[in-house]
Image (tube, helix red, strand yellow):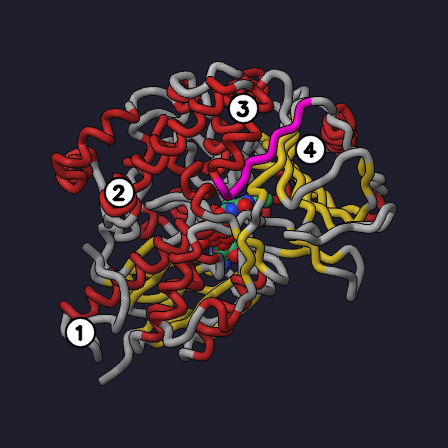
Amino acid sequence: MARERVAIIGAGVGGLVAALDLARAGADVTVLERTASPGGKMRAEALSAGGPRIEAGPTVFTMRRVFDEIFSDAGTSLDAHLTLRPLEVIARHAWSSAERLDLFADIEQSVAQIAAFAGLREANGYRAFCARARDIYQTLDASFIRAERPDVQSLVRRVGLSGVGSFWRVNPFLSLWRALGDNFSDPRLRQLFGRYATYCGSSPFLAPATLMLVAHVEQEAVWSVAGGMSRVAEVLADLAQKHGASFRYESEATEIILSGGRVAGVKIAGADQLPVDAVVVNADIAALAGGLFGGAARRALPQGQATRSLSAMTWVTNASTDGFPLARHNVFFSRDYAAEFDAIFQHSRMPGEPTVYVCAQDRDAGAEIDDGAPERLLILVNAPAIGDRHRFEPAEIEQCAHRTFGQLARCGLRVNWDHAQMITTTPNDFAARFPATGGALYGQASHGWKASFTRPSTRTPIPGLYLAGGSTHPGPGVPMAAISGRMAAAQAIAAFASTGRSRRAAMPGGMSTR
Ligand SMILES: Cc1cc2nc3c(=O)[nH]c(=O)nc-3n(C[C@H](O)[C@H](O)[C@H](O)COP(=O)(O)OP(=O)(O)OC[C@H]3O[C@@H](n4cnc5c(N)ncnc54)[C@H](O)[C@@H]3O)c2cc1C
C-alpha cells in the first residue's frame, strides 16, 4: 500500500516533533525549511567563522518529561542524545546594586532567601503561591494543555467536580498582576512572578492569573543542556531523519494546494510542486492567516485581528563582565514595570527603562569564569512586534543598547561590550525570520481570560491540514510547541487510519488525540 505523503512546513521544534512521530508511524515525510538549518527560534550564532556558538533563542529548558516521552516513544532516551543538568539556582534577580534575590529549585531555600530579602510575611506568601501555582498546573495539564480543542465547556467537563474548586480559586478572570497581590505585598516580588507572563509574550497586567502555572513548571526543574538548546533541535532532526523523514533546507513553501476541498500539494519557491496527502504548518499561524500559503488554505483559520505577542531586541556577545556575580539566568528589573508594558503594548515603543534578561551560558552548576575572561552572553529586552511597519534605524538600536547596558550598570553589572563582537537582532530581523508576525515571538498575546481558548487547535477544518508550533494550542515555549507537534501528528495518523489509507491503525506508543 502507498505510504501517506506528509509535508511539514518549518523545522521549528513543533515541526521536528511532528516529523519524527509521523515518520515513525510510517508516513513519507518531507520537512520544508526556508532557512539552512533546523530549530527556528532555537538557534545559535557564532561571532566569527569557527568561533564558539552562542545561543540566541530559548535558553530555559523545562518540562523535560515531554521530551523523555518523545525520545522513549522513538525507541531511545533523551539522555542517550543530550546531557542535561538540573540548575540549583533557577534565576538571579536584581532591582539595584543593593537588591538581589535568587530563586532556587528547592522551595525552602527560596523561602529563606525571600524572608531575608522581604520579610517573613512575603516568604509565607511565596509558600502559598507555590501551592497555588502547582494546583492550577495540575488542574490544567490534562484538562487544557494536553486536550485537543479546549473551550470553556469542555474545560469545565474535563476538570471535573474535584478540580473546579482549584480552578476557580485561581480566579481566571483576574489579571496575573492582581492575583499576585493575594500572595505578595512587596512590588518586587509581584514583578518577579508577574514576569512569567512574558514567557507567553504577554503583559502581566493583562494576562490571566492562570499563567502562574509557568512558575510551577520552572519550580519543577530548569535544566541546562550541554551544547545549548539549539542542540535539542539538531538531535530531533537527526532522529526524524533516522526514522525516514527527509529534510529540504532553503526550501520555502509558498502555497498549500487543495483539491476537492482537501490538501493535495505544496508549492515550493523556485522548485517543483510536492504532491502530498497532508501538511503540517509549523510556520506562525499569522503566515497562514495572512495568505502566505494561498487564499484557499487561509480559510483554515477564522479571520480577525489578534493582539501580537512580544517581540525582542537581543544581543549575543562574547565579553568579559565585572561587578555582578552572574548566575546562568539573570533578570535585571526596571523600576516601573507598568510603564514598560504600557510603552510596548499601548504605544508600540521600546520601553524607556527595560527589564533585561541575561543568559550567561558558560555558567553552570559550579562553573566559574576567570576574572576578565570573556563569556558567552545572550542579552534580551522585550519589544513591540512592529518589525513589519517600523524600521529600527541604527540610532534607535544604539539608544536601546545604551538603555539596556545602562540598566545592567545600574544594578552593578558591567559588560565590556564591543560593537565588533556583537550580533544584534531587532524586531525587523525577527519579522524577516518569521513571516507575517512583525517579529512577534509567541503567537498571539494571552491577554484576557478568553485568549487561550482562541488560539487555534492543531486540527483545522480543512481535511489534511494541521498546525503545530508556539502560535497554536497549547501555546508558546519549547515543550508546548513540542506537545502541539505530537498532537498534529497523532491527528494526521488517526485521519489516515480512519480513511483506511494507513499502514498502521495507530501510532505505536504515541499520544492519544483525545
Ligand atoms: C529569543 C527567544 C527566547 C526564548 N526563550 C525561551 C525559553 O527560554 N524557553 C522556552 O521554552 N521558550 C523560549 N522561547 C520560545 C520558543 O523558542 C518558541 O516558542 C518555540 O521554539 C517555537 O517553536 P515552533 O515550533 O513554533 O517553531 P519556530 O521556532 O517558530 O520555527 C518555525 C520554522 O518555520 C520556518 N518557516 C516559516 N515559514 C516557512 C515557509 N513558508 N517555508 C518553509 N519554512 C518556513 C521558519 O524558518 C522556522 O524555522 C524563546 C523564543 C525566543 C525567540
Disc 1, disc 3: CB below 8 Å? no
The image shows residue 337, relative to residue 402, as above or below, that is above
Q: Which residue is mark 3?
A: 115
Q: Which residue is found at the position 74% from the left and 30% from the top?
A: 408
- x then y, percent, for residue 103: 55, 36
Looking at the rendered image, the quarter that the C terminus falls into is bottom left
Residue at x 78%, y 62% (from the top left corner) = 51
3D distance between C-alphas at marks 3 and 4: 43 Å
Single out the residue that lies furthest toward the bottom. Answer: 1
Q: Is residue 83 left or right of residue 324?
A: left
Tag shown at residue 505:
1
Secondary structure found at label 1: loop
- Contact? badges 2 and 1 (CB < 8 Å): no
Is tag 1's residue or tag 3's residue first in the polypeptide sequence? 3
**How far is mark 2 from mark 4, CA to CA?**
38 Å
Check whether the beta carbons of the residues at disc 3 and disc 4 lie within 8 A of each other: no
Q: Amino acid at mark 2?
A: Phe
Q: Nearer the viewer, residue 448 or 378?
A: 378
- Residue 380, how many percent across, how many down? 65, 38
414 or 19, which lies in front? 414
Instruction: Name the N-terminal-most of marks 3 and 4.
Output: 3
Cα distance between the residues tagged 3 and 2: 34 Å
Numbered range of the magenta stretch: 99-106
The tag earlier along the polypeptide, 2 or 4, is 2
